Image (cartoon, grey):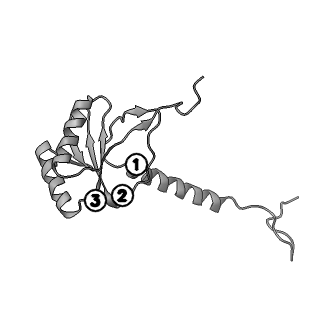
Amino acid sequence: MGMSAGGGEGQVKSDINVTPLVDVVLVLLIIFMVVTPMLQKGKDVLLPVTDNPKQEKSDDENEILVSITKDKLLYIDTDPVTEDGLLQKMTETFERNPGKLILIKGDRRLTFGDVKDIMLRINEAGFTNVSVLADKREGAGASGQ
């Protein structure tokens, strides 16, 4: 007794063809695997943690990201820069667009003084709207009893 590949004449086949679904899901998985690492901006650093970080919407067009690694190396986005180069680039940027928001992504293994020195350099260029990025502490937000 053989198995019928389709229904008889005029009958609808009720089997689900899963192959196209699997193909689409695998393509989406690959796309997300490729795109996700590109979403992180700046150099990879360990951010300081806080219980209640202020949440603000990101406006990529109006932000400049300055990263400071644990070795005190400076980066504007992913471009390495010296302290003097940072001051020069920030001054040029301020002259073109003084309304930009400067985000500092400092490694948590740095001292506050190291980050403060960079903030002062950015302030010398004219920027007063400077923020420091932080991660939310795990378990924060729960009521402490």
Measure the C-alpha gap from mark 1 to mark 3.
29 Å
Query: Which residue was labeled with disc 2?
Result: 60
Report if the CB atoms under discs 3 and 2 are less than 8 Å apart: no
Mark 2 or 1, nearer chain start: 1
Determine which of the numbered discs, if any, sits on residue 92 in the image: none
Q: Is residue 114 above or below residue 54?
A: above
98 versus 112 height, above or below: below
**C-alpha span from label 3 to label 2:** 13 Å
- Decide: marks 1, 3 in contact (CB < 8 A)? no
- Observer-side mark, 3 or 2, equals 3
- Identified at 54% across, 34% down, the residue is 141
Mark 3: amino acid: Gly
Q: Which mark is residue 37?
A: 1
Residue type at mark 1 is: Pro
Disc sitting over residue 99 in the figure: 3
* Secondary structure type for disc 3: loop
Q: Nearer the viewer, mark 1 or mark 3?
A: 3
